[in-house]
Image: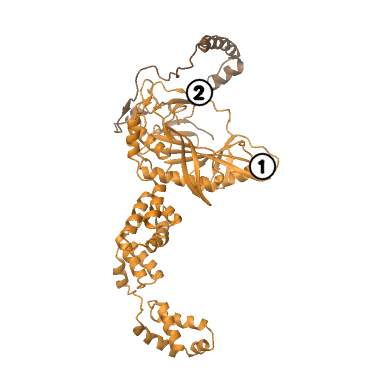
Amino acid sequence: MAINKEVVDHVAYLARIRLSDEETVRLAQQLEGIVAFIDALKNVNVEHISPTSHILPVQNVLRDDVPVRSLPIDKVLVNAPQPEGDFFGVPKIIE
Amino acid sequence: MKYEAVIGLEVHVQLKTNTKIFCGCSTEFGREPNSQVCPVCLGFPGVLPVLNKTVLEHAVKISLALDCSVQEYTKFDRKNYFYPDLPKDFQISQYDLPVGRDGFLDITVEGGEKRVGILRVHLEEDAGKLIHKDDISLVDFNRAGVPLLEIVSRPEMYSPEEAHAYLTALKSAIEYLDVADCDMEKGSLRCDANVSIRPRGERELGTKAEVKNMNSFKGVKDALAYEIKRQIESVENGGKIIQETRLWDAKNGKTFSMRSKEEAKDYRYFPEPDLPPFVMTLENIRKIKETIPELPREKAARFIREYGLSAYDAGILVVNKKDAEYAEECMRAYPGENKKPVVNWLIGPLLSEANNRTGGGELTALGILPERLIELVGFVQAEQISNLTGKSVLTDMIDTRESAADIIKRRNLIQISDTGSLETHIEEIIKANVQSVESYKQGKTGALMFLVGQVMKKTQGKANPKVVQELLKKKLA
């Protein structure tokens, strides 16, 4: 896959990262190398192997539907930069 | 050119559980903001989500009720996007291995039965709630992590009425399972619609618009009708439909474009590494299947078979499970083979009282015990009171909780059918209305009805009008 400036810009936008032109060029080159490295996997025959979605041999970890105590409100909001009353405050969203 | 609409619905149902999908916080509605949150549902670093067993069981149950094939192997994925109501900046959902797929739901539409395909049924977590103020938006995360089941239909509905019938049947089936409340006004059932149009006869689908923000069944129907009309008018005027999200504005009866940056959605789904996969044995699936009760359509078929109901009557009576059980008790207790008299009362006066009083139209909310209803229907059938008086007695029964017999006695409503006592009244009326009597004798039949009316008035509506009419005819012959 060719990693060009548009791809880097798109990924940066999705991650909400602002990049300078110089960084975009540098990252495009680096990402190109990383993707090429991963592409080596394309040469492996995986026809009869189902995709690995989880690496541990664990399944069916479930809990009973029983309530436990939630966090007290002062702990909930202790790191909130802009709390208002019992709410988290965020910059106004305009739809 | 004639166009046809194509509609697919995405329905989100909030599952009825004590706790959230991945943590033990309570799901109770209406508590103080952010009082039901913990490090897991707030997305703190280093926490581990653990799936609620009941959530998985509910999801399997609904999938089976919708005739989906239940996947033996199911897993969760991360759907990545930013929004302030989403604390982790990703939503745990299911991508390629949902709980159920390829089911269907049969619905009743004008002109008969119709089968609507279900593409998939998958689990996900709800987001928090936003409150917008003048210069700030406030977030309450109590709802974040509440279990949702998304049910995606195939694009196989062709009118707002079909979409409405599908929603009604879906809500009814899920309510029977007792795994969700399905109250659209309260947000425990939400519905988005994909709508497109195409020239009639065309097989390819047109470009679709996604319509959101409908918060009642009627809203869905109205929004779809508006959107279909908008698309047809746009195309007929040489316009082109663009793929976009549109919001329904119930107040003005319009959909409008969201206009926010409509960049192609790129959610970068990948397997949720914190949740191991789930493997369900056929034995487990079978066990859940055994807990599925008789569903609305099966119940309707049985009502038709066992009580001789029409398909129409049965369809009305089975919508709500409690009402269906109540109706069955009434039909069972009603003497004789023909259940039509009591059925007519259920879907007539009782249902209209229920609609007027409760809005939701629940028969059981009226508090009329089956034996009390049967007693009332008995009075009417025996012609001891008229149908009209019966309705008024029913209203009285609901208000006072008295029995029909007590009300009829208290209000002295027994119909006078006894010819002896009626004759005295009739003779008096004949004497007092010489002119009308003459007109009748000259062939004016309308005069007879006037005389009947006079007798009714004199007896305060208690005379049996049929008997009065016959007696008058005899006397004036």
Q: Which residue is mark 1?
A: B234
Between residue B404 and residue B116, name the one nearer to us.
Answer: B116
The quadrant of the rendering that contains the N terminus of chain B is top right
Q: Amino acid at mark 2?
A: Arg
Q: Looking at the colours in the rendered structure, which chain would you say is drawn in brown?
A: A
Where is residue B9? Give x, y as percent: 51, 39
Q: Position of residue B333 (x, y in %)?
A: 30, 60
User: Mark 2 — on which chain does it sit?
Assistant: B
What is the display colour for chain B? orange
| SS at badge 1 | helix
**Residue at x 40% of width, y 88% of height:** B428
Q: Residues within 10 Å of mark 2 (few under 14, many from 20)?
A: few
In this rendering, the answer to whether B14 lies above or below B342 is above
Q: Amino acid at mark 1?
A: Ser
Label 1 lies in what chain? Answer: B
Q: Secondary structure at mark 2?
A: loop
Rendered location of residue B173, percent (x, y): 41, 44
Q: Quadrant of residue B24?
A: top left
Q: Which residue is mark 2?
A: B268
